[in-house]
Amino acid sequence: MRDGYIARWQEMEYEASPDGDDVRIYLPDPAPGFEEVRPGRYVRVLSIGEVEDVCYIRTACVWRGEPFIILGEHNTWLRVEYTGGKAPVAIELGLEEFDFGVYQGWAAKAEVTDVREIRV
C-alpha cells in the first residue's frame, strides 16, 4: 500500500521526495547513480525537468460502508483514517479522534473492500 510521493523516471516509478526544483528518488537496493543514505535506502537527486511525472498516491478503501484511506498495515490489520467528514459516523464506528476532526482506527483486512490507489 502506497501513501506518499512517487516520481516516474525512465519509465519506472520510485518513491520520491520533491524539494524545490529537485526530486529525490529512492530505492531499497544499490543501483548506478544512487547513493546509500542508510542501510537499505539509496537516493538519487534529479532536477524536476528530468522526471516524467511527480504525484502523491493515497490508498483508499471502504470499511463498514464508509470511505477511508489506508495509512499502514500490521499483520492482518490496517490503520485507516475516515474521509467521510461526519463526526457522528466516525464516533459510531468506534474510531479515535487522532486530531481535531481526524478519526482513525484499526480495521481487519478481511473487512476492508474496494482497495484502490488514488493519484492526488
Image (tube, rainbow, N blue to C red):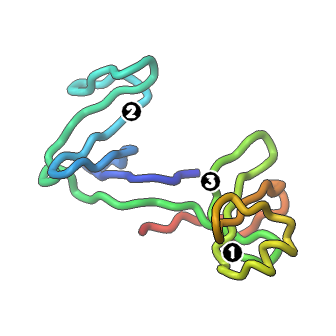
Residue 118: percent from left, percent from top = 50, 68
Residue 7: percent from left, percent from top = 31, 51
- At label 1, which amino acid type do we have? Pro
Q: Of residues 10 and 14, which is closer to you in this image?
A: 14
Q: Which mark is residue 18?
A: none
Q: Which mark is residue 71?
A: 3
Residue 98: percent from left, percent from top = 68, 58
Q: Residue at x 37, y 52 (%)?
A: 6
Q: Which mark is residue 67?
A: 1
Label whose residue precedes the other's in the sequence (2 or 3): 2
Secondary structure beneath dot 1 equals strand
Give the CA distance from mark 2 to mark 1: 31 Å
Q: Residue at x 35, y 61 (%)?
A: 55
In the displayed structure, 102 sits above or below 78; it is below
- At label 2, which amino acid type do we have? Leu
For label 3, count other residues whose C-alpha is less than 10 Å away and answer few (under 14), some (14-19) or many (20+).
Answer: some
For label 2, count other residues whose C-alpha is less than 10 Å away and answer few (under 14), some (14-19) or many (20+).
Answer: some
- At label 3, which amino acid type do we have? Leu
Secondary structure beneath dot 2 equals strand
Give the CA distance from mark 3 to mark 1: 13 Å
Label whose residue precedes the other's in the sequence (2 or 1): 2
Residue 62: percent from left, percent from top = 72, 71
Residue at the top extreme of this rendering: 39
In the displayed structure, 41 sits above or below 12; it is above
Q: Residue at x 64, y 73 (%)?
A: 83
